[in-house]
Image (cartoon, grey):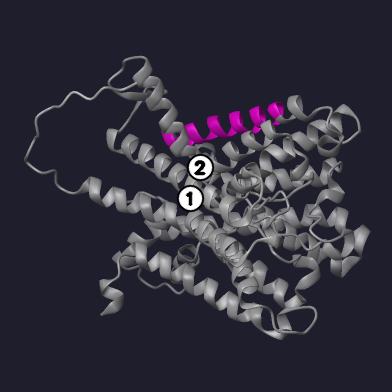
Amino acid sequence: MLKKRMSPTNVIIFGFLAIILVGTLLLVMPFSSSSGEFTDPLTALFTATSATCVTGLITVDTGIYWSAFGKSVIILLIQVGGLGFMSLAMVFSALLKRRVSTRERVLFTQSMNLDPASDLAAFAYRVTVFAFSAEGLGALLLSFRFVPEFGFLKGICFSVFHSVSAFCNAGFDILGNEFGEFASISAYADDVYVNIVLILLIVSGGLGFIVWDDIRQFIKKHDRIALYSKLVLVLSAVLILGGALFIALVEWNNAEVLGNGSAGTKIIRALFQSVTLRTAGFATVDQASLSDGTKLFSMLLMFIGGSSGSTAGGIKTGTVAIVLVATLAIIRGERDSNFKKRRIPSDTVRRAFALFVIGLFVVLVSGFALYISEGVPLNDAFFEVFSAFGTVGITVGITPSLSVFGRLLIIGLMFFGRIGIVSIMYAIMVRTNREKPPISYPVSAMPVG
């Protein structure tokens, strides 16, 4: 009876909470830590939430603190959180030739932001095949660098872990024992090969399965690419290249960020920083050394995040694209919001503006709360909050020293950034699709500006 009464939103929320709880219980156990001791429940909860919500913020170094079993739990949580447990459930249903219920269709379409009329089982299967293929190829490419450096077994483990972490936009690394605590992948800051492989994995996971499915249909059947996918591809290219250009211009002479190497290595550092800020979480540079202007710009990229139906977080590129198109339409005095000779429905525009405002309100309130509770510089507090909300996972270095309140706040933001946005979108859609009341109220003049 309880299952029947639960809305699709609640099923997804409690499903992710259950996964986080199981992960927390496993990470608390002594066999999950390298020391063989029990782990503080708050540390385990923080790590499990960060992994399941594919964020990457950590209070203890993943490579140093956790045992092989603990690392296995973390990468499993990342995989489930990245693909979404509903995607995996749909695939298992298809493999077992089990009929997909109406309820499961609603849950899956909500979690992936899909059209309910599409072939969901086939889509879920394509999602899983694409994800595992991309991660497998990424692991193979990384093994060419890691196996010669660390030996066969460790090199393969490193390749698989970082490939899955990159594709799922999680940002977890296990290089602490090799290069120092909380070093992330800074040892490879000037390694063009590793940077390019990770960038391709991050972008592949962050574009979203809906976009990749559109591209597949375009290549296979020469179907027209959907308006949403066009918006995402255009805005993603602008954000990545524009972000890299901005970082390069502002930080070019900052040796602590772009180094003292050649122009080529500075450009690759700037490009990787621009990509990782879109919810990936790997760090090749010291974020605390960024100028205030770059930190502010970084917060903007983290707030936007990746695309709907992807492994990324944030308010999503599609939302921002719609807000920009609608704003330009208002400025030009146009009644409809049009892009590439296609009209964006007014309900979609309203949902986009609602998500934008709600997301901004959440991070502003949380930023000031963290600033007051932790006594850190305001810029650093907001950087941490934007990173958690966008499920990015990079930090200026304050995460390990957060108070209990600060950690709980970041845990809540990571969960909201991954699950809350989807839930809010669904709730708005339900209210929008309800039959409109027959009452039309008198118009009242409202001054603006």
Which is in the foreground here, disc 2 or disc 1? 1
Q: Is residue 25 magenta?
A: no
Question: Where does the C terminus fall, quadrant-wise?
Answer: top left
**N-terminal-most mark, 2 or 1:** 2
Q: Secondary structure at mark 1?
A: loop
Secondary structure under tag 2 reads helix
Residue drawn 46% across the image and 48% down it:
362
- Mark 1 closeness class: few <14, some 14–19, many ≥20 residues within 10 Å: many
* Residue 211, numbered circle: 2
What numbered label is drawn on residue 77? none
C-alpha span from label 2 to label 1: 9 Å
Name the residue tied to disc 1.
309
Q: Which residue is depicted at the point 56% across and 64% down? A: 405
Residue closest to the eye, 37 or 84: 37
Against 33, residue 355 (above or below) is above
Q: Is residue 13 visible?
A: yes
Provide the residue span drawn in magenta: 225-246
Compared to residue 203, the image places residue 31 above or below, namely: below
Query: Residue 57 falls in which quadrant of the image?
Result: bottom right
Q: Position of residue 199 (x, y in %)?
A: 71, 43
Percent of width and height locating residue 346: 28, 33
Image point (72%, 31%), residue name: 247
Q: What secondary structure is the magenta-colored segment mainly? A: helix
Counting from the top left corner in percent of width and height, residue 296 is at: 62, 35
- Please name whichever residue, 224 or 361, is drawn nearer the observer in this view of the structure: 361
Q: Which amino acid does the dot numbered 2 rest on? A: Val
| Nearer-the-camera pick, 275 or 211 | 275
Question: Do the CB atoms of the residues marked 2 and 1 lie less than 8 Å apart?
Answer: yes
